[in-house]
Image (tube, rainbow, N blue to C red):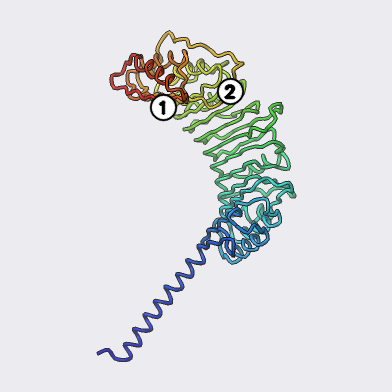
Amino acid sequence: MLRSSNILLIFKTKFRDIKTIFRDIKTIFRDITCFNGSGNASIQSSSKIFEYDHAMYQDGLGSRFSRFVYSSLHEAPILESLRLKLDRKSGALDIGLWVRTAVKRSVRELDIDMPFIFAPVILPWSLYTGGCKTLVTWKLSNMTLVDAFSLPASFPFLKELSLVHMKYPSEEFVNEFLSNCPVLEDLAVEQCSDDNVTGLSVKIPSLKNLSLRKSTDIDEDKTCGYVVDAPSLESFEVLDHSGEFCVIENNMPEIVYAYLDINYSHPWKILRSISSAKQLELCLASSKEYPVGTVFHNLVYLMLCTCEPEWLNLLLFLLRDSPKLRFLRFEQYHPIRPSEQRLWWSEPSSVPECILSSLEILEWVKYEGIEEEKEIVAFILGNARLLNKATISSTSTDPVKKLEMLKELSFLSRCSSTCHLTFD
């Protein structure tokens, strides 16, 4: 038989275990909170990570949402990440208060996404002083920064920065801001109209990934562009249909991937700077002044947009200068302007080395079956000895037209006995 003292000991042990379990349940319930309209907002948080979405707050009262955010942040002893997805009901003063609270708790990731509001959102000075000592990831969207003081010397730990549709006090402000990020590795900038920046300067030796984009509402008559000096860059994206230039001050020998969708009249210095790339996606307005002698020794993947009038010339140049190309894709990214004169396909006097000895996959998206397209496909199928797969897809909804395309493609001779042709 169990003695009474043993029974009491067992009871105390079990009770202590139940208390521990109950405390753990309370902790989990506190750390993962789901509110909705009657006293709840849609918030996901842990003791170190807080994520808020104002759109999920059903009662629509900005004041109640603001009080809840502040109170929950105020109770957190340490704040690893603060992510805010806000709307027009969110006030600039509230954002400043939340950010100050996060800075006091050594925030490492700050992500603020909100629609543009007319009153400028002034981020508190503590973010530039205390915050700059801890921030590793910083993402801002649709905000206006006001330069109340000079910037601090450095953001010593900032590695990832995203600035989308921002407005700045001056061009000097944003260029100085970027130069104060000595270990930055990932930078994404999407400019909007009236952002007070005409020449964005990105000179960061540590940078590995860079994405530069301009929104379509920017005035095309405004002279603007980029200056880039990032010798460690591995991924480079530029989407700009309104700018005039992108100056690359030094080659980028570490580049692996590059995406260029630009209408600059002289884009060739950029191509020369990224000749080490393994993967290229290009939509270029001109093939004039192509950099003769530039060889893409490492290029295995090429995507070429077919919307520009001179794309056929560019294709021939790139096929000639890419001896290891294995994957070739054509796609029309943008509508074709009917007023522009299109070039006719002219078969080269000699077959490019990549067609003969390395090309394995051909893809054509938005194939229309016009004469020059058929001639290009016929040239590749007839000469590509190692081609394994050719996939052609059309956007036509006319079944008769699609059947005719399929018949024409099926009758084309193929140099490779293992080539499988697919048409959609």
Left or right, 191 with reference to 283: right
- Of the pair 137 and 214, the residue shown nearer to us: 214
Residue 346: % across, % down: 47, 9
Residue drawn at x 64%, y 26% is 245
Mark 1: amino acid: Val
69 to 325, vertically: above or below: below
- Of the pair 135 and 5, the residue shown nearer to us: 5
Left or right, 202 with reference to 19: right
Tell me the SS state at disc 1.
loop
Label 1 to label 2, Cα distance in Å? 21 Å
Tell me the SS state at disc 2.
loop
Left or right, 321 with reference to 136: left
Q: Which residue is mark 2?
A: 267
Residue 223: % across, % down: 70, 27
290 to 189, vertically: above or below: above
193 to 77, vertically: above or below: above
Q: Which mark is residue 300?
A: 1
